Image (cartoon, helix red, strand yellow):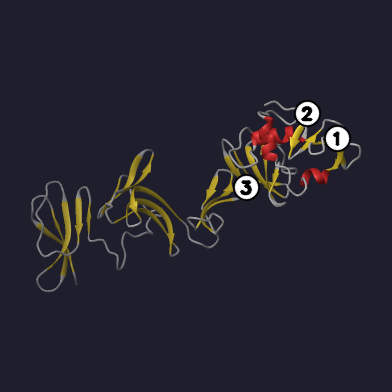
Amino acid sequence: MAYTENSTIGGLTALGEAPASADMVPIWDASAAATRMATVAELLTNAGGGIEFSTAIASLGSETGDVADGDTLLQSLAKINDRLPLAGGTLTGQIGMPAGSAATPAIVFDGSLALHSGSTGLVVSAGGESYASMGADMAVQADGFIGFSSSTSDATTTTDCGIRRDGAGLLAQRKGANAQESRVYNTYTDASNYERGMFAWRSNQLFIGSEEAGTGSFRNTYLVAHGSSMISMLSGQTFFKEHVRSNTSGTKDMGGSGSEWANLWLAQSVIQKEIATAPAGVAAKSHIYTEDDGSGKTRLMVIFGTGVAQQIAIEP
């Protein structure tokens, strides 16, 4: 049903004429079959019954498009109802807002936090200062913190893990005096079954390596340079691909009191701790070891490929 200039609402018909005064409106009173002046309050209350806008709007039929100058009140309400139903329903069409800026945002929440559109996307700001932007990329202020809440249901609780910017190209995982730890998982079933690599501060000590729990298996760790494993840490043993050298000649030890090496195997020689039985000779190699001479003294011995043991020195 198309809109007509005269619309009857609860027995009162609004006329398309200018009001006689600011608070009076000419109407057609159906009960009196005559035109008279009515106050705005009377129209709104309709003798206590109120105007049934939803019924009146429904009687207008389809009213779409933007609200324009010259539209009557009911036409305007009908167009609004088409976008945002008065009695609930689903909003159709777009809600248009100005782009705004940090100083004059498009949306303000309680006079503090605000939103506006910027060159990088949606910008969150407060007090004229832009805190974060979300578009193709997400960014926060240089002194900002991207963190995770300790709660699984409330993101507003205190964060206990996150990252910060220490400078250009410098990503930091820090939170005051709290020790931090980073983990990269090979497998993960739950907190008790996993395989992972870790870089962690624990009890004021830095740990780098791999660890496992439950159904997880031990995995080797490699330190790589130029695409090649320079140090291989396997189960019970460590391999070095290149030379192991002291950075200061003649001042460093291999092993020490309480952390002695058991045996040292070289390409052409073996240096071994005191043994009970002399080893067999090996061609092109010398085997240096110590043994008890049978009277309680330790002597230094060597065996060449011939297999004949030779005494080098004996305990005085």
Cα separation, mark 3 vs mark 2, equals 61 Å
For mark 2, give the secondary structure: loop
Quadrant showing the N terminus:
top right
Residue position for label 1: 35
Q: Is residue 203 left or right of residue 5?
A: left
Marks 2/1: CA–CA distance: 15 Å
Q: Earlier in the sequence, mark 3 or mark 2?
A: 2
- The crowding category of the residue bearing disc 1, from other C-alpha atoms within 10 Å (few below 14, some 14 to 19, many at least 20), is some
Kind of residue indicated by mark 1: Thr
How many marks do you count on the picture? 3
Instruction: Name the residue nearer the viewer: 73 or 182.
Output: 73
Above or below for 310 versus 244: below
Residue 172 shows in this picture = yes
Element carrying mark 3 = loop
Q: Secondary structure at mark 1?
A: strand
Q: Earlier in the sequence, mark 1 or mark 3?
A: 1
Q: Residue furthest top?
A: 2
Residue at screen point 29% across, 65% down: 259
Q: Which residue is mark 3?
A: 142
Query: From the viewer's perspective, is residue 81 above or below residue 161?
Result: above
Judging depth in this view, the residue of 268 and 117 nearest the camera is 117
